[in-house]
Image (cartoon, grey):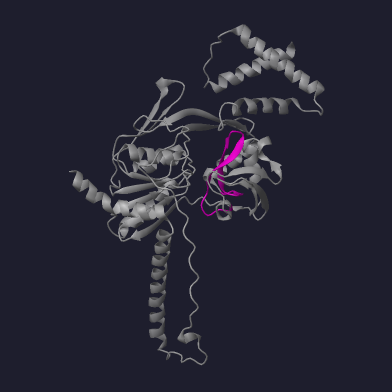
Amino acid sequence: MKKIRMLTTASLALVTFLAGGGVMKAVSAEADYESLRRFSQILDMVEQYYVKEVSHKELLDGALKGMLENLDPHSTLMTEKEFQEMQESTSGEFFGVGIEITMQNNQVLVVSPIEDTPGHRAGLRAGDIIVAVDGEFTMDMTLNEVVSKMRGKRGTDVELQVLHKDSSKPVTMKITRDAIPLISVKSRELEPGYWWIRLTRFSGHTAEDLAEALKKAKAKGEIKGIVLDLRNNPGGLLDQSVEVADMFLRDGDIVSMRGRDAQRAQVFKARPQADDVDSPMVVLVNAGSASASEIVAGALRDRKRALILGEQTFGKGSVQNLIPLSDGTGLKITVARYYTPSGKSIQAEGIKPDFEIAWEAPREEETPAFSVREKDLRRHLEQQKAKKDDAKKADSKDEKKDKDAKAAEDVKDMIDRDNQLRLALQFVKTLPVLKELQK
């Protein structure tokens, strides 16, 4: 009986904490007591009869973990190490494979590979199923256990069994762990005045880095159009997604959050800023676009600020809070659903693009025909040597020309090999014409 009273006190304290400090009214004190008595009985039986000795703490931690993970795929109790890794993934450097994963139907699903990481280079794609890690089947693990097993020291290998989308047999992939870059913004000028801006994730400095990229673009001249690429962006921090959307909106709603208490709903609004960007926009999305990237895409679509092009997004419309606990562990718990400005929840549905265009793998290029040039012939005549100063100037000019030519060639190759990007560029160039016709 003493154990039951102790357990009841601990459990009520936990309930009070999860409720934000408010006292929860018991529907039936007797029913609550009966449930706790049953829990205590099972705890006693496991301690007495289980095949090996298990500590009281292990059992209680497991019970709490199971309770939270039974709620939804994103709520959990994290160990001290897991909580530290979660914080590092948005603010510091960490080592691993570089993929965002979730648990769906007891399977570990790849939401999105992070660009320029070992997982991305190895060929992991959104929709792949991680069947096993280092020979251990993931169906017997929690999501955090899978994440922990894939992380490790830089330069070490991890072996994944992966079932690719539309495949019937898993393949084994040996991936070498490396630093996961937290550079979340990339930009390139596709044509004079037309910019491709890629957000790979929403980490602590994404909005700041995007502002810097836009500043550099403006320094080169008028921004005539932007292709905002959110493909395979697994999301990240809510505040960063709000700041990013705010850069392209002058006023009105960006996103709203509603939890169990309707009176405490939060609405995030855009504010007019001197450096707001009004250029025509097309946003690229796909099945790997999730969470924070869906907030941005949904806001820009509903406010008729941009056209959305690509494939239907992942559909993660819930918000999680990370709560540090006194022993160094952490609670990750779903606290709300978020809604786009039109009031639509994308939970388990995703955002359907205005123009649904599937990505097409580029055709294999033909091997160039063998050719011989003058410089390849034996005893070919060398150019006469110029004066040193003239030669240095010529070399400097040639280097700049070569660098510019290579950059232009890289952009051309990028557009040629990406049908969605190619179409997005065409759309963003014609948007001003379409708006004039609508007047």
Find out whether residue 6 is within the magenta segment.
Answer: no
> At 78% across and 22% down in the image, what residue appears?
47
Counting from the top left corner in percent of width and height, residue 108 is at 60, 39
Left or right of residue 2, residue 390 in this image: left
> At 30% across and 34% down in the image, what residue appears?
252
> At 33% across and 51% down in the image, what residue appears?
226
Query: Does 53 appear above or below 366?
Result: above
In the rendered image, the quadrant that contains the C terminus is top left
Q: Is residue 244 visible?
A: yes
Query: Does 292 appear above or below 179?
Result: above
> At 19% across and 47% down in the image, what residue appears?
437
The magenta region covers: 93-118
Counting from the top left corner in percent of width and height, residue 347 is at 46, 32
Counting from the top left corner in percent of width and height, residue 346 is at 43, 33
Pick the front one: 401 or 21? 401
Q: Residue farthest to the front? A: 168
Left or right of residue 419, residue 224 in this image: left
Counting from the top left corner in percent of width and height, residue 401 is at 38, 73
Q: Is residue 151 visible?
A: no
In the rendered image, the quadrant that contains the N terminus is top right
Number of numbered markers: 0
Pick the front one: 267 or 109? 109
Left or right of residue 9, residue 218 in this image: left
Q: Residue farthest to the left? A: 439
Pick the front one: 360 or 138? 360
Find out whether residue 110 is within the magenta segment.
Answer: yes
